[in-house]
Image: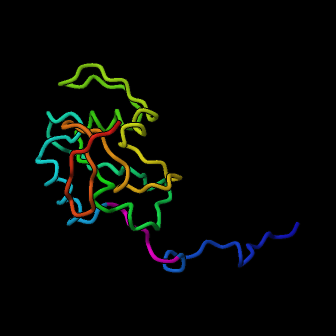
């Protein structure tokens, strides 16, 4: 019986040979812009303290090389209950009662942006506790009318 030898071209590459690391999350300065824009409360319910920052256009399981994914317009400051709703989970929200999550509804309200969408986070309006807004990478938000 012959010994099976690994082929050199099939060996795992060391981390340093795989290329540059992909961004892992919002840089501290961008995270601070998002939290400041929210004023300390969840941007969806407007009632509970922020404890998470959500990517509207997801990074994906393997991450992404798109630098826009970690800009301020792509982030929402949320309470954990609203974050669960955006991700499609139903919750018993402390302020709103029973809320049924739906990823399709999250896309309609701009809370999620498909990775296939040609529009970026600055172009996609978002439904928030204060109504429809347009977010910018500077950390600003502007109220808008959406038909």
Residue 69 falls in image quadrant: bottom left
Residue pictured at 50% horizontal, 59% vertical: 62
Q: Is residue 21 magenta?
A: yes
Q: Is residue 147 magenta?
A: no
* Residue at screen point 22% across, 39% down: 79
The extreme right residue here reads 1
Name the residue rendered at 71%, 79% in the picture: 8
Seen from the viewer's position, the closer of residues 3 and 26 is 26
**Residue sitting nearer the eye, 64 or 131:** 131
Dominant SS type (magenta): loop
Residue situated in front as seen by the camera: 46 or 108:
108
69 is higher (above) or lower (below) than 111: below
x%, y% of residue 133? 25, 45
Residue span colored magenta: 19-25
Q: Is residue 127 above or below residue 89?
A: below
> What is the x, y in percent for residue 41?
14, 42
The residue shown at (26%, 58%) is: 136
Question: Quadrant location of the N terminus?
Answer: bottom right
Q: Is residue 87 left or right of residue 60?
A: left
Quadrant that contains the C terminus: top left
- Residue at the extreme left: 39
Residue 68 in percent (x, y) is at: 38, 64
Left or right for 139, reference 54? left
């Amino acid at each position: 019986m012959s010994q099976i030898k690994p082929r050199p071209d099939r060996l795992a590459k060391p981390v340093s040979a795989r290329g540059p690391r992909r961004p892992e999350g919002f840089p501290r300065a961008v995270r601070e812009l998002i939290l400041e824009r929210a004023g300390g409360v969840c941007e969806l319910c407007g009632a509970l303290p922020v404890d998470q920052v959500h990517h509207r256009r997801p990074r994906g399981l393997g991450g992404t090389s798109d630098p826009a994914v970690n800009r301020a317009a792509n982030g929402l400051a949320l309470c954990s209950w609203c974050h669960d709703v955006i991700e499609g989970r139903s919750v018993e929200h402390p302020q709103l009662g029973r809320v049924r999550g739906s990823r399709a509804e999250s896309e309609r309200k701009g809370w999620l942006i498909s990775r296939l969408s040609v529009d970026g986070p600055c172009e996609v309006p978002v439904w928030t506790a204060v109504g429809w807004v347009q977010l910018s990478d500077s950390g600003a938000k502007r109220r808008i009318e959406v038909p």
